[in-house]
Amino acid sequence: MNAEELKSFLKNRLPPEINRLILHAAELAASQNLHLYLVGGLVRDFLLNKTPKDADLVLAANAIKFGQGLLEGFNYKATLHPRFNNLSADINGFKLDISTARNEFYPDPGKLPEVLEGDIKADLFRRDFKINAMALSLSPQDFGCLVDPYNGLTDLKQHKLSVLHPKSFRDDPSRIWRALRYSERLGFDISSETLTLLQRDAQLIPLIGADRLRYEMECIFKEAKPENILLKAEETGVLKNSLPFIKADNWPADKFAEARNMYGENVSPEIYLCLLSVRLDKPQAEALITGLHLSKYISACLRDYQCLAEHLAELGRVDLSPSRLYGILVKCKKEARQAFNIANDNPIVRKHLMLFQEELSGIKPCLKGTDLLTLGFAPGPDIKTVLAELLNLKLDGKIPSRTDEIDYVKRRQADDQV
Ligand code: CTP
């Protein structure tokens, strides 16, 4: 590793403003006689020549003070974490973390660690996997030098994923999902010792709580093939210890792939979760919502999916009227409909979903509430009822023109007066 290699990696693989900030941070640290390092994912990605998703800097000094100095004069949003003495900055959507080198001590499995100040070696030892426990110096005297006290490079070369010590998953059971995620993303094998520990400690996953588990799921859904991670989670017992109702076999796996074919590579977590919920009944879907502490929107998608499933037989009928089809689908979130489309191979159901999406959802009566007032209706609930009738008749093709709508309204008024 040399300085030029690192400089050209930072220049070519990072957004220009991040590259500039990192180089500026290196100068600032040097001017204060501080040792500054790049750590974690970026180092791993540098060695694999992959594009990093975020950047982590570590120094053996007050990172909040240093970070504030670094970002002075810029208009970036920074979040301070005094407990860990670190700072996270959002640089136009790219995350830059600046942390104080620390030792960590985990009082209980799954709980957040107690923090002590440390040096870079101690800081690397608290990390999840050897391949994530390397640093690159940004100090002028050894810029670009690799700090690798736990032989992460060896693992990297052997395409292997292993923890630094046997208590790693106990300290933080969310690392179990991280292991499955990195193994899939990088195509690395989890070492046999690490796999044994992972299976031993899978039962501790519930200790991380719903929010952290949801975060892990969100990360998984951002990977290229989340289904492979879920299949591995099923095989290792991780899934049943995380989401007991969910079964990951070839069915959701094929459907995930189909979703990407149909809707593009960046399938939303809503669609993936709906697909995972297909074989759940209502109480189980509710348990999934609680178990992942899902947002209001995603919860609504899952509930809408359940509602669509209740109407499956009706949605498969050739004689289903457009107005009834509209009535079933209009209140459902788009992602629930999209997942339902993927989940059901029935061509009539798919045709109906398409008809709604492409045509019916855009249909509106020509007449508005104000037109009805002009035509002599009194303000009040009647207006809403008549507009709904107009919409249904229009959906069913019975009143194609504005004149037909006016005729209908007048006939209705006349009937009311009889
Ligand atoms: N880390 C850890 N244990 C965790 C989470 C994170 O040890 N449960 C450490 C790892 O050293 C990791 C670093 O914190 O490299 C940064 O975490 P994160 O940003 O989640 O991962 P990256 O390695 O940057 O990977 P990604 O490409 O997925 O962002």
Image: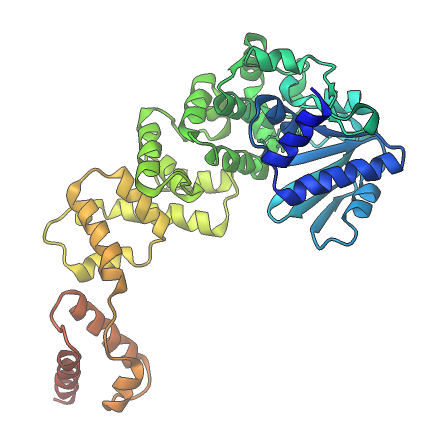
Q: Residue at x 27, y 55 (%)?
A: 329
Q: Position of residue 176 (x, y in %)?
A: 56, 23
| The N terminus, quarter of image | top right
Query: Where residue 270 appears, x then y in whole percent?
Result: 42, 44
Front-most of residues 137 and 377: 137
Instruction: Kindly indicate the quadrant of the structure image that contains residue 209.
Output: top right
> Taking 411 as reference, is 40 left or right?
right
Q: Is residue 117 left or right of residue 252?
A: right
Question: Height in image: 163 above or below 240?
Answer: above
Q: Is residue 126 visible?
A: no
Front residue of 32/80: it is 32
Q: Is residue 320 above or below residue 131?
A: below
Q: Quadrant of the C terminus?
A: bottom left
Q: Quadrant of ligand 1?
A: top right
Residue 303 visible, this orientation: yes
| Nearest to the observer: residue 289 or residue 153 | 153
Please tell me whether residue 186 is drawn above or below residue 160 in the rendered image. below
Residue drawn at x 61%, y 49% as measured from the top left: 92
Q: Is residue 58 left or right of residue 262?
A: right
Asked whether 207 or 298 is in front, the reply is 298
Query: Residue 79 location in percent, x, y?
Result: 72, 47
- Extreme front residue here? 4
Q: Residue 45: horizontal and vertical position, in percent?
A: 60, 26
